[in-house]
Image (cartoon, grey):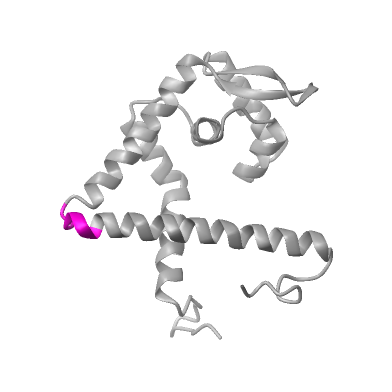
């Protein structure tokens, strides 16, 4: 059972879960993302920058996949893609795996802008760990990579359990590990 503080708030009992939750909340906040975009010298909104980040990281994507990744509706994705296309940052290409489908891909200029966004993130991480002993930064990187791989594997198991037992909650399907 999660503890409750005097103000009636509940929180994680596991410090790592609380720390990761705080970090994710900060990194996904629109204010933080706007600050990162401004730091990169890029003039665009949060949705558009998120589209560039995702396409830059994952390669060309269908609009529906982008909607799922960004947890946005199709109209928001369509408008964002249209804005980015008007700026020459993305283009629509035929899906080689399905000639009827269309992928959103970065143009050369879009790749340049995406790299600018990622470079700001790289500088931020370098600054955060700049006063850490090198061995600590290296160990943290290795452990964070391991945690990320294991968490992604856990997420895959949850999806597989849900697909195998539609309508059954994760706990009922054995989501504990």
- The magenta stretch is 131-136
The quarter in which the N terminus is drawn is bottom right
The one of 110 and 25 positioned closer to us in this rendering: 110
Q: Is residue 45 left or right of residue 71?
A: left
Relative image position of residue 9 (x, y in whole percent): 49, 77
Residue 42 figure quarter: top left
Report the residue at 48% width, 76% height from top: 11
Residue sitting at the far right:
166
Q: What residue appears at the point 63 percent right and 21 percent down from the top-left corner?
A: 82
- Residue 70 % position (x, y): 60, 42
Give the vertical position of 35 relative to 40 (above or below): below
Q: Is residue 128 above or below residue 22?
A: above
Q: Position of residue 126 (x, y in %)?
A: 25, 45
Magenta segment: does it hold 134? Answer: yes
Q: Is residue 172 left or right of residue 175?
A: right
Q: Residue at x 63, y 75 (%)?
A: 176
63 shown above or below 24: above
Image quarter hosting the C terminus: bottom right
- Residue 62 in which image quadrant: top right
């Amino acid at each position: 059972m999660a503890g409750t503080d005097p103000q009636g708030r509940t929180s994680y009992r596991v410090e790592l879960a609380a720390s990761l939750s705080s970090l994710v909340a900060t990194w996904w906040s629109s204010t933080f993302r706007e600050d990162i975009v401004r730091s990169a010298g890029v003039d665009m909104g949060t949705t558009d920058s998120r589209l560039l980040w995702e396409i830059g990281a994952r390669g060309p994507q269908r609009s529906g996949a982008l909607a799922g990744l960004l947890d946005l509706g199709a109209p928001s994705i369509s408008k964002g893609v249209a804005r980015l296309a008007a700026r020459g940052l993305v283009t629509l290409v035929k899906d080689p795996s399905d000639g009827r489908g269309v992928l959103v891909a970065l143009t050369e200029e879009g790749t340049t802008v995406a790299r600018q966004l990622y470079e700001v993130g790289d500088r931020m991480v370098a600054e955060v760990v700049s006063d850490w002993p090198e061995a600590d930064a290296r160990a943290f990187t290795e452990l964070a990579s391991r945690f990320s791989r294991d968490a992604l594997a856990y997420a895959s198991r949850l999806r597989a359990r849900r697909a195998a037992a539609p309508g059954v909650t994760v706990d009922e399907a054995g989501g504990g590990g």
